[in-house]
Image (spheres, rainbow, N blue to C red):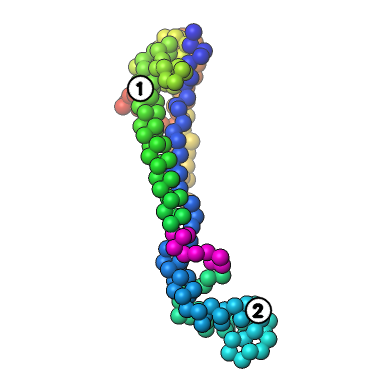
């Protein structure tokens, strides 16, 4: 029985990205700001709608507010609107822990991927439709339909030969040059199944056109 043999390649595990976190240099700038109690007091006053220069009420988000905010943070290299409540050193430690967990998971995935890649490679090197490699309780077989010009699907054994070439002509328009493209058809002499490809027959393991 070959119906229980899986032909598709085993899907490799994906690489895990580091989580989105604030950059270290921004956090260090924020820490510098927090240590400047005068600037912190100015910003708190500004956020409550009071000018830290004149003591007058201003509209948050409008022209005067924006000007005072820009003057206040001009000595720093970034704004800290989204940093409220963050303790920089603790945040950086959390980032290191999160990144370390990602590194551990990536190492596990890469180790497993090496094994999966080996299984995929070896199963696709099998030369008959009924052969298989067993992995984790499942059977995996080649996904190639043709080997050495022989149609191997379900043990067909028919000889595959070139039967037709169809050329699709391109164009030479300015800024859009589409080359000619040929589609090759190959037919199994036993079951009559047709195979088409736009690539040279090396796709099936040959360096020259079949006859």
Q: Residue at x 47, y 18 (%)?
A: 138
Name the residue rendered at 61%, 91% in the picture.
54
Across and down, in percent, residue 80 comes to 53, 70
Whether residue 170 is visible: yes
Q: Which x, y percent locates residue 102? A: 43, 45
Q: Secondary structure at mark 1?
A: helix
Q: Percent from the top left, x then y, of residue 46? A: 61, 81
Q: Is residue 149 visible?
A: no
Which residue is under mark 1?
122
Q: Earlier in the sequence, mark 2 or mark 1?
A: 2
Answer left or right for 67 relative to 89: right
In the rendered structure, are the residues bearing label 2 and label 1 in contact, judged by CB atoms less than 8 Å apart?
no
The image quarter containing residue 116 is top left
147, 14: nearer the viewer: 14
Q: Residue at x 44, y 63 (%)?
A: 89
At label 1, counting other C-alpha atoms closer than 10 Å, the crowd grade (few under 14, some 14-19, many 20 or more) is some
Q: Point out the residue furthest to the bottom here.
A: 54
Looking at the rendered image, the quarter that the C terminus falls into is top left
Instruction: Single out the mark in the foreground, 2 or 1.
Output: 2
Q: Is residue 200 above or below residue 171?
A: above
Q: Which residues are magenta?
A: 83-92
Q: Which residue, given by chain and number where applicable, does mark 2 sit on?
A: 48
> Does dot 2 land on a helix, a strand or a loop?
loop
Residue 142: percent from the left, percent from the top?
A: 41, 19
Q: Which one is nearer the viewer's eye here, 104 or 142?
A: 104
Say few, some or many: other residues with alpha carbon within 10 Å of mark 2 (under 14 / 14 to 19 / 20 or more): few
Residue closest to the eye, 149 or 132: 132
Q: Quadrant of residue 205?
A: top left
Q: Nearer the viewer, residue 35 or 149?
A: 35
Figure check: 195 above or below 58: above
Task: Please give the label number shown on residue 149.
Answer: none
CA separation in Å, label 2 and label 1:
68 Å
């Amino acid at each position: 029985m070959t119906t229980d043999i899986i032909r598709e390649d085993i899907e490799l595990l994906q690489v895990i990205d580091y989580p989105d976190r604030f950059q270290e240099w921004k956090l260090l700038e924020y820490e510098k700001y927090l240590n400047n109690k005068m600037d912190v007091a100015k910003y708190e006053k500004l956020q409550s709608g009071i000018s830290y220069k004149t003591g007058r009420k201003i509209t948050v988000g409008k022209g005067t507010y924006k000007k005072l905010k820009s003057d206040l943070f001009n000595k720093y290299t970034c704004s800290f609107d989204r940093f409220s409540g963050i303790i920089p050193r603790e945040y950086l430690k959390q980032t290191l822990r999160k990144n370390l967990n990602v590194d551990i998971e990536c190492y596990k995935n890469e180790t497993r991927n090496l094994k999966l890649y080996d299984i995929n490679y070896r199963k696709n090197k099998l030369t008959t439709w009924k052969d298989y490699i067993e992995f984790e309780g499942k059977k995996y077989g080649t996904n190639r339909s043709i080997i050495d010009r022989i149609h191997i699907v379900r043990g067909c054994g028919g000889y595959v030969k070139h039967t037709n070439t169809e050329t699709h002509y391109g164009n030479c328009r300015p800024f859009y040059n589409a080359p000619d493209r040929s589609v090759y058809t190959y037919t199994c002499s036993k079951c009559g199944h047709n195979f088409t490809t736009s690539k040279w027959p090396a796709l099936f393991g040959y360096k020259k056109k079949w006859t």
